[in-house]
Image: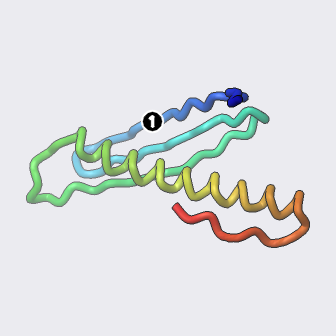
Amino acid sequence: MMHTAVGWHVELEFMEDDQHTRAVAMVRLADGTEVRAHGRASRHQVDSNQPRVGEEIAGARALNELAMQLLSKAHEEIDTVSGRTSHPIHV
C-alpha cells in the first residue's frame, strides 16, 4: 500500500529586460527547509524578442540547479544517517 506523505510546490519567478531573463526556483520541503536556485538566459542581438523562450530556458536551468541541490541534500542526509559515503544518484 502506498501513502502520500507530503506534497511539494515549486515556485518560479522571472525578471526580464530586453536581452536577459533571470529565473528563481524555490521549493519548501515538509521540514520547512527552503531550497532556491537560479537560472539565466540571454538573447542574442540578432534573435527576435521572444520572452516566453527566455523564460523556458532560464526556468529549465533554475529547475535543473534545484534538482542538483536536492540530490546533494539527499546524499548528505543518507551519509549522516548511515555513517558512510553514499553512491552517486544520477539524474
The answer to whether 10 appears left or right of 18 in the picture is right
Q: Residue 62: x and y, percent?
A: 46, 50
Q: Name the element at disc 1.
A: strand
Q: Nearer the viewer, residue 59 or 8?
A: 8
In the figure, residue 87 lies in which quadrant? bottom right
Residue 12 is situated, as x and y percent measured from the top left of the image, at 46, 36
Which residue shows up at 38% across the image and 54% down it?
A: 40
Task: Return the x and y of residue 29 as percentages of the image width and height.
Answer: 69, 36
Coloring scheme used: rainbow
Q: Looking at the image, is 11 positioned above or below residue 85?
A: above
- Residue at 27% x, 47% y is 54
As drawn, is 78 to the left or to the right of 55? Answer: right
Left or right, 82 with respect to 57, comes to right
Rendered position, 91 above or below 4: below
Residue name at image x 78 percent, y 35 percent: 31
Q: Which residue occupies the foreground of this view, 31 or 84?
A: 84
Image quadrant where one finds the N terminus: top right
Q: Seen in the image, is 72 located left or right of residue 20? A: right
Q: Amino acid at mark 1?
A: Glu
Which residue in the structure is indicated by mark 1? 13
Residue 14 location, quadrant: top left
**How dense is the environment of label 1, judged by Cα within 10 Å: few (below 14), some, or many (20 and up)?**
few
**Whether residue 57 is situated above or below residue 34 in the rendered picture:** below
Number of marks in the image? 1
For image coordinates 23% across by 45% down, the residue present is 53
Q: Taking 62 as reference, is 25 above or below it?
A: above
Residue 59 in which image quadrant: top left
